[in-house]
Amino acid sequence: MTAHQLKLNPSKTELLVIPGLPLNAICPLQMIQNAAAGLVFNLPKFSYTTPLLRSLHWLPVAARIRFKTLMLTYKAKNGQAPSYLKALITPRTAPRSLRSASTAQLVPPSLRVK
């Protein structure tokens, strides 16, 4: 497992790919998704796959990463996520009274990378 992945459930094979993954790591994942869509529809290798992804209701890989991150953040903030994810969510507190204090901002968690 790389520094850009978080294993969500040990009994399942679900991984969250953390945002900030370089484009050269996302492109191969997108190519695999495109190939899978072509395989589902039994199309030639170099077919245009964007309409296929839409008909399957599959988000592109970069959009899926962003969606999963936002969904897990929403669930953790509203108490619907596991406790280990809720522990990562810290609301940002302003040192003094500002107009921006009414917005619900979060402190990004610090990551230790080996």
Image (spheres, helix red, strand yellow):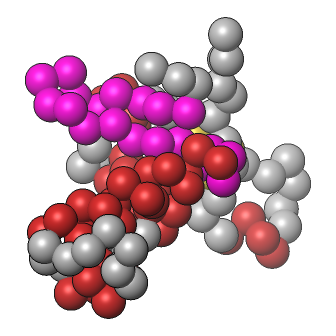
- Examine the image and state in which quarter residue 52 appears: bottom left
Front one among 9 and 42: 42
Residue nearest the observer in this picture, 14 or 23: 23
**Quarter of the image holding residue 60?**
bottom left
Image coords of residue 16 (percent x, y): 39, 41
Compared to residue 22, the image places residue 68 above or below, namely below
- Where is 16 relative to 6, above or below? below
- Residue 46 is a magenta residue: no
The chief SS type of the magenta part is loop
Residue placed at 65% from the left, 59% from the top?
Answer: 105
Residue 74 visible in image = no
**x%, y% of residue 2?**
53, 23
**Which residue is at a point 84% across and 67% down the rendered structure image?**
98
Above or below: residue 98 compared with residue 28 = below
In the drawing, does residue 39 fall left or right of residue 60? left
* Stretch of the chain drawn in magenta: 4-23
Residue 81, relative to residue 50: is it above or below?
Answer: above
